[in-house]
Amino acid sequence: MNLKKVLLIVLGILVIYTIYIAVSLLSLPSVETLKNRRISMTIKVKDWKGNYHPFVVGPKNRDWTPSSSIPPEMKWAVILAEDSRFYKHEGIDVKAIKNAIKYDLEKKSFKRGASTITQQVAKNLFLSREKTISRKVKEVVLARRMEQELTKGRIIELYLNVVELGPMVHGIGHGARYYFGKPASALTPRECAFLAAMLPGPRVAYNPYKNLSKVLRRSDMILKLMKKRGVLTDGEYSVALAEQPNVGGLQRKVDESIEKEEIFENMTSAVIVSPEIPEAGSGENIESGESLPLSPPEGEAIPEGGEQPAEPRQPEDQEAQ
């Protein structure tokens, strides 16, 4: 087979694949429904045995925590650790992508990710975890649509209510009750940083019962960054550093869960299940499983609601939508 035929075959494959992606994009779900905080939706999550379970996203979930009940320190801990340019990008962080490519080329690996919080919400709610080009394209398109339809506060609310924080432990409401025996609204700054520190790998790398010191070190880094960015005062920072999260009482429960080999993963598409519920109120990459560098640009003030804040302690959006 000569070179010309090979090139034609490759070109044909690329054309077919492009058409496939274009058609699949036409079938993407609408994100406009997510604007309605009264609506609950059901997604599928997969445990560590590979079995699927329904998971409710919205007020019908007993652990659902509306934005007004999420401590500002919890929001900022996650934003500064996972996506420090969250209030600056529009769903896709080009700068982070460039840095990730540079890092991977230098390390000759594909360990550094560049997914934004918005992309992670899109993936968790609507897509599978398959590592394909088509899935990534869908994720990017959905993230861009979310940024157009939703406020930043709504996006972070959704993110914090679906993230994995342990074996079949999803969302900070469940996480706060599971680890600390309290509602998310009562979390201390240290506890907020502790949960945020677990995000890259709550099953193994940042499982507090397997690697408590590693989780504490990363939470120390997050607290330091929160002080640097004005989220915590010097006094609050000192108190938070001195606090030792009391999670030892859950050792047996976690050990039993690990033995069952459960894992969290979302399937495609979401289903609206309760459109008339009363109003409930108001990375870098989690996939990588690595400790992410906490070094936002120097001199960058903490934004609020997508704009420069008058008071950096309240990372809330304008709920005009």
Image: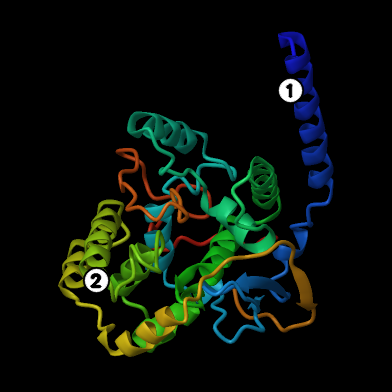
Instruction: Check disc 2 and report the residue beneath it.
Output: 212
Q: Please, what is the three-letter code of the amino acid marked with disc 1?
A: Val
Judged by depth in the image, the label closer to the viewer, 2 or 1, is: 1
Q: Position of residue 132 (x, y in %)?
A: 63, 44
- Helix or strand or loop: what does disc 2 sit on? helix
In the picture shown, does residue 182 fall above or below 209? Answer: below
114 relative to 188 in the view: left or right:
right
Q: Position of residue 300 (x, y in %)?
A: 36, 41
The one nearer the camera, 51 or 18, is: 51
224 relative to 154 in the view: left or right:
left
Q: Please, what is the three-letter code of the amino acid marked with disc 2?
A: Leu
Q: Position of residue 211 (x, y in %)?
A: 26, 68
The residue at 77%/34% (across/down) is 17
Number of residues whose C-alpha sits closer than 10 Å to that of mark 1, classed few (under 14), some (14–19) or many (20 or more): few
The one nearer the camera, 311 or 5, is: 5
The residue at 32%/66% (across/down) is 193
- Helix or strand or loop: what does disc 1 sit on? helix
The one nearer the camera, 17 or 308, is: 17
Q: In 3D space, how far apart are the residues under numbered discs 2 and 1 (Cα atoms)?
A: 50 Å
The circle drawn on residue 10 is 1
In the picture shown, does residue 73 fall above or below 39? Answer: above
Q: Which image quadrant is residue 321 in?
A: bottom right
The residue at 45%/56% (across/down) is 286
